[in-house]
Every structure is written in C-alpha cells, then in structure tokens.
Image (spheres, grey):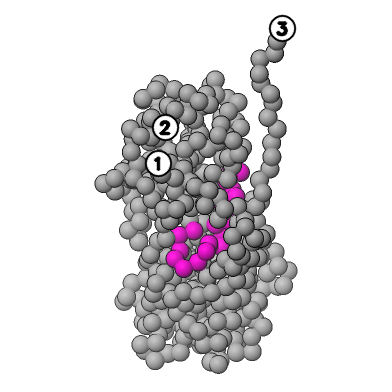
Amino acid sequence: MVQGNAIIGQSGGPTAVINASLVGVVEAALKSKAIGRVLGMRFGIEGVLGDHLVDLGAQTKATLATLRGTPSSALGSSRHKLKDEELPAVLAQLQKYDIHYYFMIGGNDTMDTIHRVTAFARQQGYDLKGVGVAKTVDNDLDGTDHTPGYPSAARYIALSVLQAGLLARDMQRVDQYVIFQTVGRSAGWLPAAAALAKTYPADAPHLILLPERPFDAQAFLAAVADAHRKYGFCSIVCGEGITYADGTPVSASQTRDKFNNVEFGAMGGTSAAMMLHQMIKNKFGWRGEFQVTESLQMCAADRGIKLDFDEAYGCGRQAVQLALKGISEVMVTIERRSKRGAPYKAGFGTIALAKVANAARPMPDRFIANNGMFVTSAFLEYARPLVGPLPVYAALNTQKAKP
C-alpha cells in the first residue's frame, strides 16, 4: 500500500448531494493509515494548475457534518478542459504535494480528466491511484444504475410539475398551456421523472419531450390540441436538449462551452421551452407560460432525498477503499440488487474510466412510449424507489350543482 497524500476535486454542474460524496472521501481518507494529508482542489483542476489547494483535514468535525447536507460544490467547480500540454504541470503539482491518491467527483468530462491524469502519471512511472465518484443530475453516466444527485433532482422535477400542474388546471381559463423545461443535454432521465407526478389521465404532465427522440413539430402540435380538447389545458415537460431530426437544437442556441457542448439557455440564446411556447401561441393563439428553472434543480437540498445523500456519501467512502486496495482508473457505480417488485436494495461496483469518459447514457427504448412523447410503466418502476412517495393533494368535485 503506497504511502502519501490525497487530493479531491469537484467539477461540472453541482447537485444537492455532491458535498456528501466529498465528506465521504475526506472522512474515509483521514481514517486511513496510508494517507497523510487530505487536500482539496479549489475550482477543480484549475486549483491544481493554479496551486490553490485547501487543507480538508484541517476542517472541524462540525463543519464536515454540516457539509454532508449542504448543496452545491463546496470546493468550487470548473469546466476547464484539461489540455495535453498541461499534464506535466499537473503531475509536477501532485509530486510537489506528495499526492498518490487522486479523487474527483463529477460527470463524463470529469471522468475523462481523471483518466488522462492517472494514465499520464503511470506513463511517467509515478504511482498515482485515481478513482472517480459519479455525479450528475442528468443521470447519463454509463455503468451505474443511477448517479448520486439524480434522485433528488428527479424529485424536484416531479414535485414542481405536480404543483404547477394543479395551478395550470385551475388557471386554464387564463392560461391554456404550461411548459416546464429541465436540464439534460442529451438524455431524458430528468424530464421523464415528471411522469411520477401523474396519477390520472387528466393530471399533469400530458406530454414529455425527450432528447432521445427527434422533435416533430406537427406531431407535437397535434398532441397539444388533443390534450387541450380532453382536459381544457395542456401540461408539457421538455428536456433542454431536444433536437429536430437533423440534430438542430429546438432552442436554436449557437453558444458552446469548452467541451463543445451546446450551452442551452446561454446569454444571447433562447430555450426550448420558449420556442415551444411560441409555436403553440402562433398555432392556436392561446395564452400560456413557460417555466425554466435552470440550475435550481441542481441545488434544491430542501427537496433532497435521504437515500440520495446516503448513497452519495457511500460512493465517496467506497472510492477511498478501492484506492487503498490498489484499484485505480475506475469510477464507483451503484448497482441495484433488489428483484423486481421487492423493496429497493443497492450496492457498489466499478466501471473503467475509459468506458465512461465522454460517453453519455441515453434512456433505453423500453422506458420511452411508442409515440416518443411520454414514458412507459417500466420507467416508473425504475424511478419510484429513487424519488420516493409524492404528496397527495385534494381535488374538489366540480360537477355543476343542481338548482
């Protein structure tokens, strides 16, 4: 077992439970006899390059205990794309601080960073154990049943659509439609979670638009008209990354980040919800509204789920245990081990960083309805144990009273 210090970083968009993973890594590392100091990267890999590291071992127990339930990224996040020519500088910093254990909490691009850093260190003959901890509300990382952060964000979506659906139902004489947009560049796991809000056919949502299916304006408008005819209003949920058949984003945004990803809702751009709103208004002349919460679903700890916080913390601890066993260049995964219909049960596994880096996991076809604008019962069975029960609200009997 190699002796040395450990370093931890957070990267990409935050979640309500990402700091629980951070605390899991810190506490497990501090208890290890092989690990000396536990350092944190300030603003991800930029903290390594800029020599701004934080002594996490110097934090009080009270701070760590509170941090476990604190949303967003306490160390600060980054979307810096590590260049090949920067790898020697990163390795020099790791050697300077005698770091032999390297952990990062993030999504696809973060896993790519860990993979490249650890591979470069190995090529240079430096012993560096690198393990990734999954994080993304998009739930689009390969090899894991779900990612820490997804259950809480999915609950945020389901509750928002449930409550906004009641508002839309009761305000249908004023606004005939409402569109709720979720984050999710290329996978529909989050918009799909809105289906958990639905108990009866008239309940919101009526339509769910997923990035996995090309957007067909004519089919969409026909479905809107049908829902409006049946229920008096139409509730629509869309993923921010929905595209036309030719790959053009419905949002029409042309702004891209350093990883060449379209920045939906970026300055100067528009949003898919805004475009859908305009389509419906132009077609039917109705009044309606759109709801774009952007990053709020990434940090709503008040709607966080205990299961999510516990699994995030456990993933952090598991990362350290793997590294101490000499296992490197893997990401910790969550494996669902309960049989169909049985109470939810899960454990931890691993997937090679090379397999998960820069690869998005779309929703499988069996989770998507045949018309491409809703989900199946199989998805609901998958998601319900993660999101937990939703509140039940009263509905008046609104039949016309007899004189």
Q: Is residue 344 magenta?
A: no
Q: Is residue 40 left or right of residue 255?
A: right
Q: Which residue has dot 3 on it?
A: 403
Disc 1 crowd, CA 10 A, few/some/many (<14, 14-19, 20+): few
Who's the residue at 43% across and 41% down the image? 373
Q: Are marks 2 and 1 in contact (CB under 8 Å)?
A: yes
Query: Can you tell which mark lies on residue 223?
Result: 2
Who's the residue at 68% across and 69% down the image? 64
Q: Nearer the viewer, residue 341 or 361?
A: 341
Query: SS of the residue at dot 2?
Result: helix
Q: CA distance from mark 2 to mark 1?
A: 10 Å
Q: Is residue 140 magenta?
A: yes
In the rendered image, the residue lying farthest to the left is 246
Vertical placement of 57 versus 164: above or below? below
Vertical placement of 127 versus 223: above or below? below
Q: Nearer the viewer, residue 171 or 336?
A: 336
Query: Can you tell which mark lies on residue 197?
Result: none
Give the amino acid at mark 1: Asn
In the rendered image, the residue lying farthest to the top is 403
Who's the residue at 46% across and 68% down the image? 143
Q: Earlier in the sequence, mark 3 or mark 1?
A: 1
Vertical placement of 30 versus 403: above or below? below
Disc 2 crowd, CA 10 A, few/some/many (<14, 14-19, 20+): some
Query: Can you tell which mark lies on residue 371?
Result: 1
Residue numbers of the magenta segment: 139-160
Location of the N terminus by quadrant is bottom right
Give the amino acid at mark 3: Pro
Q: Nearer the viewer, residue 157 or 69?
A: 157
Query: SS of the residue at dot 3?
Result: loop
Disc 3 crowd, CA 10 A, few/some/many (<14, 14-19, 20+): few
